[in-house]
Amino acid sequence: MEKNFELEKRFGAKLAYIRKSQKLSQMKLAEIVDMNFNYIGQIERGEANVTIKTMHILADALNVELKDLFDFSF
């Protein structure tokens, strides 16, 4: 269980990093992907268990490949 939590935290941190590098607020990203901004915050804090479909939607909205959200060398 601890390993999964670490993965969720790292994924969320990468999502936040990419979002901020594109100068998007959580609110704006949520608007683009038609999700609640609180959910975006939960993802970024590693509190949400995100589906592959949601990951794909977020990657598309940020104009990155899905695999880029799993490159934790930033």
Image (cartoon, rainbow, N blue to C red):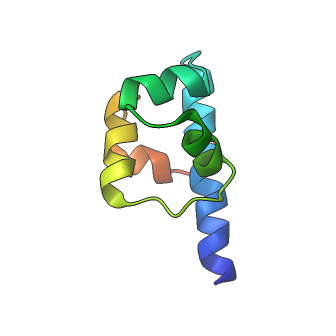
Q: Nearer the viewer, residue 54 or 11?
A: 54
Q: Position of residue 35 (x, y in %)?
A: 44, 37
**Outermost residue to the bottom:** 1
Classify residue 32 as left or right of residue 11. Answer: left
| Residue at x-position 37% and y-position 34% | 64
Q: Position of residue 48 (x, y in %)?
A: 57, 59
| Residue at x-position 59% and y-position 22% | 21
Question: Is residue 46 visible to the viewer in this orientation of the structure?
Answer: yes
What number of labels is visible?
Answer: 0
| Residue at x-position 64% and y-position 78% | 3
Picture quadrant where residue 9 is located: bottom right
Picture quadrant where residue 7 is located: bottom right
| Residue at x-position 51% and y-position 37% | 36
Above or below, 56 against 61 in this view is: below
Above or below, 39 against 37 in this view is: below
Classify residue 36 as left or right of residue 41. Answer: left
Above or below, 49 against 21 in this view is: below
Q: Position of residue 1 (x, y in %)?
A: 63, 84
Above or below, 13 against 17 in this view is: below
Question: Is residue 63 visible to the viewer in this orientation of the structure?
Answer: no
**Which quadrant of the rendered structure holds the C terminus?**
top right
Q: Nearer the viewer, residue 30 or 7?
A: 30
